[in-house]
Amino acid sequence: MAAVLDYTGVNAIYRVPTAGTRIGPYQLIDQLQQGGMSTVYLGYHIYARAYVAIKIVDSYTADLRMLNREREIMQALEHEHIVPCLDAGNFGRYHYLVMPFMQGGTLEDMLSRGVFTLDEAYVVLEQLTSALAYMHSLGLLHRDIKATNILFDQDYNLYLNDLGIVTWLGEKPAQQGRVMGTPQYMAPELFQGRVDQRSDVYSVGILLYQMLTGRLPFDGPSDWRICIHHIETKPLAPSFYNPSLPRSVERVILGALEKDPNHRYQTIEELLHAFQKAVESPTFFEHLSTQWQATCQKLRSRLSASAPALHSALVKITTCSCNTAYIDTCSAFPYTLLTSRDAIYRVLRFIYFSSWGSAGGGMRPGKGVNHVANRRRKTHPHVNIRGGP
């Protein structure tokens, strides 16, 4: 397996400019992010009077070919969810790229405030899919999708950032025997010298896992061990960390994290469609609630005149059982039923015969459960249908 170079880790020591330094028309205000080959600053354009983000590399230590390649790709791409390049140049030993400053922060900043809801995760996935599908259609692979490379503006519109290790479809992922990327988000096939759009799908699957559980499937102090886990270890089910996660959503996430690219979603659009379908599909309790309401409506109509007290109890049971929030807590629904044994018996008896009738059975008008019991006693006198001695 090729060695791994964490593109964003501090692997090279170089001299960085300090806040207050003037580079061309830009004043450096504060350092936003420190990487292995570059530093990102909050800058201020003195003449335009606008805040910007400035990515700076030191030509004494950095590979300028990568920076020039990133600049060319950023200037060629035009998409509403990809960070544009506003300016580029050099000032002495420093070379820089200028981008809009995104006031909404990064996806990692948002995750520090808690896990996402399904709807929030879908909004992120939808916008990210739009950007990646555009890149893939041009034969480009991002290869460094992670929470810190997803930015948001003040209106929380998503922007995909950092095209520093973008490669063309068909290119080898290794450079001088090293695979560049961030170990926690890298697809297993990268370590075997293969990469295509399904590698980006894998990285997005990691993001989904992270957004909905607050954790990475594989992490730790050793980059080497993380890479081995990507190749050999199945991730823990997301529901282990987030028990409320629907099984249908969990299957989508794990499908994106298949070790074999042929078993994954083949395109980023397929992943989005599967996730949308999983989010919109009713959960087991929602389906149960719908069936319960239909059955209880029949029962209420029968009991409203003949048994007012039981009808009142059933209304309370139905109100509680059809409230998804109560069902999800698994408390109010069972408690309400267990407080009335007679109600349980009569409700379940009704449900049983209603189900039997819909299957072609049922009772004749005027015949009740006692009639059925008496008939069974006559047919099988030795059988005690009450179950007692």
Image (tube, rainbow, N blue to C red):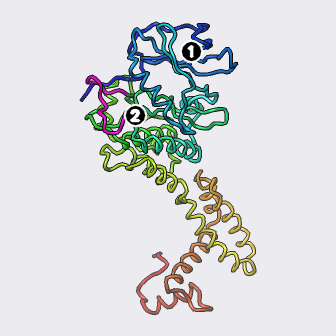
Taking the image as shown, residue 283 lies to the left or right of residue 154, namely left
**Local crowd size for mark 2, using a 10 Å CA cut-off: few (<14), some (14–19), many (≥20):** many
Q: Residue at x 56, y 84 (%)?
A: 369
Residue 383 location in percent, x, y? 42, 84
Q: Earlier in the sequence, mark 2 or mark 1?
A: 1
From the viewer's perspective, is 365 left or right of 63? right
Quadrant of the rendering where the C terminus is positioned: bottom left
Q: Nearer the viewer, residue 36 or 116?
A: 36
Seen in the image, is 92 located left or right of residue 290?
Answer: left
Within the magenta stretch, is there residue 172? yes
Q: Position of residue 183 (x, y in %)?
A: 37, 29
Work out whether 77 lies above or below 339: above
Q: Nearer the viewer, residue 20 or 7?
A: 20
Residue tagged 1? 31
Queried whether the magenta region covers residue 168, the answer comes back as yes
Which residues are the magenta region? 167-180
State the separation of the CA atoms marked 2 and 1.
Answer: 25 Å
Residue hosting label 2 = 143
Q: Residue at x 53, y 48 (%)?
A: 244
